[in-house]
Image: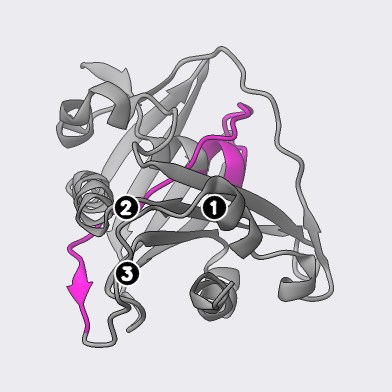
Amino acid sequence: MRRSTTTALGLSTVCTVLALTGCASHDEPADTSAPAHRGNSTPSISAPLSSAQLNHRLLNESDLGEGYTRKPETPRRNDDVTVIGCPALEKLGGHTATGSGLDFARKAKASFAYTGSSSSEVAEELYSDNPAKLSKGIGKVFDAMLSCPSYQVASGSTVVDMGTEKSAAPDLGDEQWSQLLTFSAGGQRSVVKQTAIRTGNVLVIVSGSPGLVDAHLDKALAKVRAPK
């Protein structure tokens, strides 16, 4: 059984959203499923937004409401994170599968803990690049993950059983992707929803407890699209 380094999306979800493997990373995630094209498109901008501009467009505690606390970025551990039993993810290879983040020009990220219901979490990632590159890059990772209904992710001596299921994408932005990921490790089972929306030259990815993702996706997109 071959093993290769997992995608940035899987790594971010396992380490940042669930922390099931006990690893720590500030790498960015991604999503997989055939994109839906809509008519409410936003005119694309040729030059990517700067990282500072993206950081300014991230959700914060005041946007989310009472009960949310921003989590500090944690230093990366040296344990390799690998995917087992998903040939499509193995084929991605190179920078796309190194766990160092999606290969886009600019990025920003924030993660939050929510104490309102059983200490759930939600994370937002923003990327900016040429719209065609954003679409191709995120679509490739989503397609790869959805091609494997079940596989494993290993970090150090810990192995996490993963399941992937396509989810209905909301009618937002120019293109949409969404999936449900199930993680099982150490007797724990968690479900994470990941939804990606491309609006012009910005890619918005919201990951976490399904209810929190659904609750905050609209405001995440609105903040990205608001004139600055």
Q: Residue at x 15, y 28 (%)?
A: 91
Name the residue carrying label 1: 190
Relative image position of residue 148 (x, y in whole percent)? 21, 44
What amino acid is at disc 3? Ser
Q: Position of residue 33 (x, y in %)?
A: 23, 60
Mark 1 falls on what kind of element? strand
Determine which residue is flagged by label 2: 164
> How busy is the neighbourhood of tag 3: few (under 14 within 10 Å), some, or many (20 plus)?
some
Tell me which label, 1 or 2, sits earlier in the chain: 2
Amino acid type assigned to the residue bearing label 2 in the image: Thr
Query: Is 147 on the left-hand or right-hand side of 212?
Result: left
Residue 185 at least partly seen: no
For badge 1, the amino acid type reads Ser
Q: Which residues are magenta?
A: 13-38
> Within the magenta stretch, is there residue 21?
yes
Residue underneath mark 3: 167
